[in-house]
């Protein structure tokens, strides 16, 4: 699992970190489809994601997300370009410059 990772989905990438597929300290950044302008916006995103994507491990996921937010490792292109759209057709991680997916089920 060595290398540097760039995530392309906040929800999926936080899940993968919580589940141990990607080490948090190896994440360079996550390019998220969110548009949280301030703390209130982040609180809303984390509340919604905790009830949906992260419902089985919401406390751990919130801790991971907060770490990424506080260390300024989340980019939000939608804040400057509302029409920006994430493309996940080749996976939601880039590892050392190459599209990558965790080995789910292995």
Image: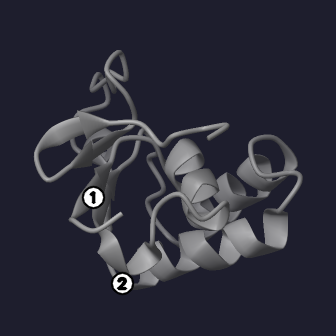
| Marker disc for residue 5 | 1
- Dot 2 lies on which element? loop
The residue nearer to you, when weighing 69 against 9, is: 9
| Residue for point 48% across, 56% down | 36
Judge left or right: residue 78 versus residue 63: left
| Residue for point 16% across, 38% down | 98
Q: Taking 65 as reference, is 44 above or below it?
A: above
Give the labeled residue for mark 2: 71
The residue nearer to you, when weighing 93 against 63, is: 93
Q: Position of residue 40 (x, y in %)?
A: 62, 68
Of all residues, the one furthest to the front in this rendering is 106
Q: Position of residue 64 (x, y in %)?
A: 58, 74
Tell me if mark 2 has few (under 14), some (14-19) or many (20+) residues whose alpha carbon lies within 10 angstroms of its own. few
Q: Position of residue 89 (x, y in %)?
A: 35, 15
Quadrant in the picture for the N terminus: bottom left
Judge left or right: residue 99 versus residue 54: left
The residue nearer to you, when weighing 14 against 66, is: 14
């Amino acid at each position: 699992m060595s290398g540097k990772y760039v995530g392309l989905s906040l929800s999926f990438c936080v899940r993968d970190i919580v589940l141990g597929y990607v080490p948090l300290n190896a994440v360079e950044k996550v390019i998220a489809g969110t548009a949280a302008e301030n703390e209130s916006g982040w609180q809303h995103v984390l509340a919604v994601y905790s009830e949906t994507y992260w419902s089985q491990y919401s406390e751990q996921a919130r801790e991971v997300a907060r770490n990424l937010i506080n260390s300024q490792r989340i980019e939000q292109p939608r804040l400057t370009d509302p029409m920006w759209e994430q493309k996940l057709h080749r996976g939601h991680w880039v590892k050392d410059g190459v599209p990558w997916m965790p080995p789910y089920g292995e």
